[in-house]
Image (spheres, rainbow, N blue to C red):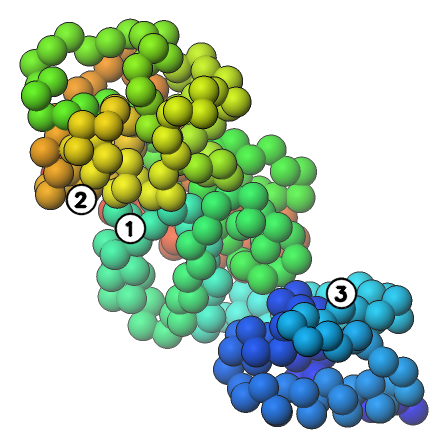
Amino acid sequence: MINLTLRQLRYFEALARHRHFGRAAASCAITQPALSMQIREMEDALGTALFERGARQVRLTAFGETVARRVEGILRAVDDLGDLARASGRGLDGPLRLGVIPTVAPYLLPAVIGRLMRLHAGLDLRLRETVTPRLIAELADGRLDAAIVALPVSEPALAEQPLFTESFVLVRPAADAGRPVPAPDRLREMRLLLLEEGHCFRDQALSFCAMQSDRPRELLDGSSLSTLVQMVGAGIGVTLIPEMAVAVETRSAPVSIARFADPQPRRTIGLIWRRSNPLAAKFGAISDAVRECAASLAQAS
C-alpha cells in the first residue's frame, strides 16, 4: 500500500502551483532542501517522477498532472472537514483566509481588522490582496474562504452578499478647483489616467466614460490609485478614484476633488464565497464589520 502524508500532498500542491522550489518552500514556510526531500520521498513511494527539473523552473510530468488534479480534490476535502468542524462551534474562531481587491484594502482593512480582532479574539485572519480574477480563481480552488470585491461577479459557484455602495470622484490638478465638472463623455477628450488591466475599477471607470479598453496609447496606466493621484498632482492628467480613497490619497498631492452630477458613478462592494463552504453561516460577522467600518469612513469624509 502506498503511504503518502498530508504534508507531502500540501508540499506537492505548492510546487505544482509555483513551479519553483524556492518559492514553493517559502509559501510552505520550510527550507528548500526539506521540500525537495519530501517531494523525492513522494516520487519514490509512487514509483515514478512527478516533476521535470530544469535549471530555473520545474514542470509537472504527464503523471504529475494527473496526480495534481487528484491532490487538489483531496486537499479541498480535508479543508472542508476542518471548516465543517469550525462551523459547528461558536463564534468566529480559527484561521480565515480573506481576499480583498487593491482599491478597497488600504482604506477599509485597517478598521475592519481592528474591529474583528476586538470582537473575535480567537480569529486568525489571513489576508490576500490582489485583483478580482485572481481572487475568484483562489476561491474556486479552496485557497481563500471569502473575498471582498466589487459586485457583481456572476459566478454560479459563488454566493454574493452586497455590503455597501460608494461614489467615484474626479481628481484634477489643484489649479482646476472650482471649474465646472465635465460630463462623463467629455472625459474621453481629456488625459484620463486609469489603473492597469486586470483591475475591476478600471473597467468601471471606462464604462462610466463610455470608453473602450483599447483607448489611445498616450494615455497612461498606473499600478495603484496612489500612483494615479500623484501623476494628477504633477499635472499629467485627471483620474477617478472611489470615495473611500480620498482622505488617504489626496493628503500629500496638490489636487482638487470634484463630484459628478447625478446619476453619479457608483460601485457596490460585497462579500463572495463558495456556496459549498461550511463556514458560510459565519460570514455574517465579516459582513457586519465591513458595513460598519464603511459607514464610519463615509461619515468622516
Residue 287 place in picture, x, y as percent: 39, 48
Residue 228: percent from the left, percent from the top? Answer: 28, 36
The amino acid marked with disc number 1 is Pro
Q: Is residue 122 above or below residue 229?
A: below
Seen from the viewer's position, the closer of residues 79 and 189 is: 189
Count how many numbered circles sit on residues in the image.
Answer: 3
Q: Position of residue 148 (x, y in %)?
A: 43, 46
Residue annotated with mark 3: 73
In the picture, measured across the screen, residue 8 lies left or right of residue 272, that is: right
Q: Quadrant of the N terminus?
A: bottom right
Question: Three-letter amino acid code at disc 3?
Answer: Gly
Left or right: residue 79 versus residue 144 is right
Instruction: Give the Cα distance between marks 2 and 1.
Output: 9 Å
User: Within 10 Å of the Cα at label 3, are there few (<14), some (14-19), or many (20+) other Cα atoms?
Assistant: few
Residue bearing the label numbered 1: 106
Q: State the residue position of label 2.
A: 248
